[in-house]
Amino acid sequence: MDISQFSGFLAFLFVFTAGFWLLIFLLTFVVPYWITGTVIENIKLKAAAKKLK
């Protein structure tokens, strides 16, 4: 394995692991945060609509 193959392997490894950790971050933090915010917003909108009636 020469230096060009090794550098290509390192680049692949970096891209693969960066994508893996980004996926983990999205599934454990961003998606639940988004869902929680949507639920809270809907509760506030329903309470405001009920208050207007």
Image: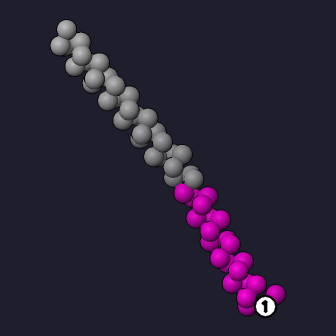
Could you tell me which residue is drawn at 62 percent across and 68 percent down? 15
Q: Which residue is mark 1?
A: 2
Predominant secondary structure, magenta span: helix
Position of the C terminus by quadrant: top left
Does residue 44 sit above or below 4 in this rendering?
above
Seen from the viewer's position, the closer of residues 10 and 45 is 45
Does residue 7 sit above or below 21 in this rendering?
below
Which quarter of the picture shows residue 4?
Answer: bottom right
Q: How is this picture coloured?
A: one colour
Could you tell me which residue is drawn at 51 percent across and 45 percent down? 28
Residue 25 image position (x, y, % from top left): 51, 52
Position of the N terminus by quadrant: bottom right
* Secondary structure of the residue carrying numbered label 1: loop
Could you tell me which residue is drawn at 68 percent across and 72 percent down? 12
Which quarter of the picture shows residue 39?
Answer: top left
Could you tell me which residue is drawn at 69 percent across and 84 percent down? 7
Write the start and end of the magenta stretch as one range. Answer: 1-22
